[in-house]
Amino acid sequence: MNDRAALDLLLAHGTLSRTRIGKLTGLSKPTASQLLARLEAAGLVVATGTTEGRPGPNAQLYAVNAGAAHAAGLDVNPQRVLAAVADITGATVGRFELPTPGRRSADGVVTQVTDALEGAVKAAGLSRGDVHRVVIGTPGAFDPSTGRLRYASHLPGWHSPTLLDELAAALPMPVEYENDVNLAAVAEQRLGAARGHDDFVLLWNQEGLGASLVIGGRLHRGFTGGAGEVGFLPVPGTPLVRQVVKANSGGFQELAGAQSVPRLARGLGIETPEQPYADVAAGLLTKAAAGHEDDPRLAELLRLFAQRLATGLASVTAVLDPEVIVLAGGVTTAGGEPLRALVQAELAELAASRPKLLIGVVRRDPVLRGALESALATTRDEVFDTSR
């Protein structure tokens, strides 16, 4: 326990002296010295230099050995596979992006994953065998009873019942799979807006609309992995969508998904460019949030979109009563603080409880960052277990 406490402190602070570790852990100097000697012999910590510019003799500084282990994360969507490798401290040491247009077979998926991982491993100057664990994030979720991907009909090639076995055979390290929005929530919980919160909902709005539910500090995935698929939620203001899995859409998605923003804009007489609807939505909401007094239509667009988001969130709030709701994904974060304030005010009118709304702060590849954080958490538990 003392060893792990010291390692966690070194991860948090970067470098510490023996005296500082002793004070932070409550250990005596001799015990702290023995602890550091043990960790250094195990290859888990390294001496990095000495303190300077202070009265008295310089003190030896120690840090976690970054090369003690590595973990990898993959973020998969229909357009590309994004892979990265991180050392045990969490620093990204290799990254690779593999475009994947038009690949639809399970064999192609295995090749995509192995090629993307290999690219990131090579960029890190490592071999595949140096990677301790991999976490792969995808839309939807793998049903634990069948091993098949559900809720993601738009992800070609990933629905074979033998896919997980084929990937396990192709990769030499343990592999875990997680919903992409859940991984964005992990990133916000470890590094972002949800730090210190054990009960929160992350609402993700980009190409699709989904949520991650964290209850008691842990992800809630549901019986089939479908917890948080709020895009399928029936809501007032849209026709009832039937066969939602086949349609890959539902009421809340139609009401407040990215595709709704260009429709709202055109209804207000605002011209929209011929671009992917998520890009158009983000661009419109960015302009609206900037406060263009010369065009009141943009202010109305922001108000209407906030009302739509709050309509679906009212149902989520009634069921879960979360402490915090994090608004994430490129569409909602484009609206920034003005959108957040409007949604907060509208939700106060629609919901009995009053969760605090926050804007997500992990903006660069949050799914990939969450995959790395998830893989690193398990890797650290295994590598830092010095009692084995």
Image (cartoon, grey):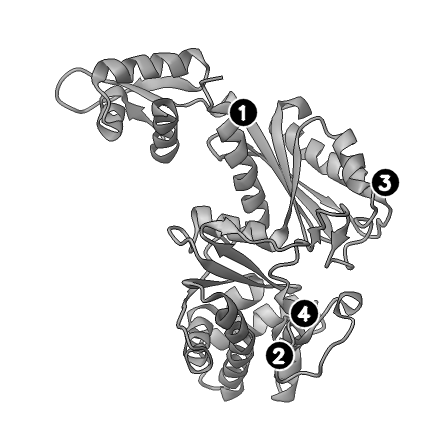
Tags 2 and 4 in contact by the CB under 8 Å rule? no
99 lies left or right of 217: right
Q: Nearer the viewer, residue 286 or 166?
A: 166
> Is 287 situated left or right of 35 in this image?
right
In the rendered image of this protein, does residue 155 appear above or below residue 119?
Answer: below
Q: Which one is earlier in the sequence, the residue at label 1 or at label 2?
A: 1
The answer to whether residue 365 of the structure is visible from this angle is no
Which residue is drawn at the image coordinates 46% and 59% (left, top)? 200
Percent position of residue 242, x then y: 76, 75
Q: Which residue type carries mark 1?
A: Ala
Amino acid residing under circle 4: Phe
Which mark is on residue 107? 3
Q: Quadrant of the N terminus?
A: top left
Q: Write down the residue under mark 2.
A: 235
Q: Secondary structure at mark 4?
A: helix
Q: Badge 4, how many Cα within 10 Å: few under 14, some, many 20+? A: many
**Gap between marks 3 and 1, in whole Å?**
30 Å
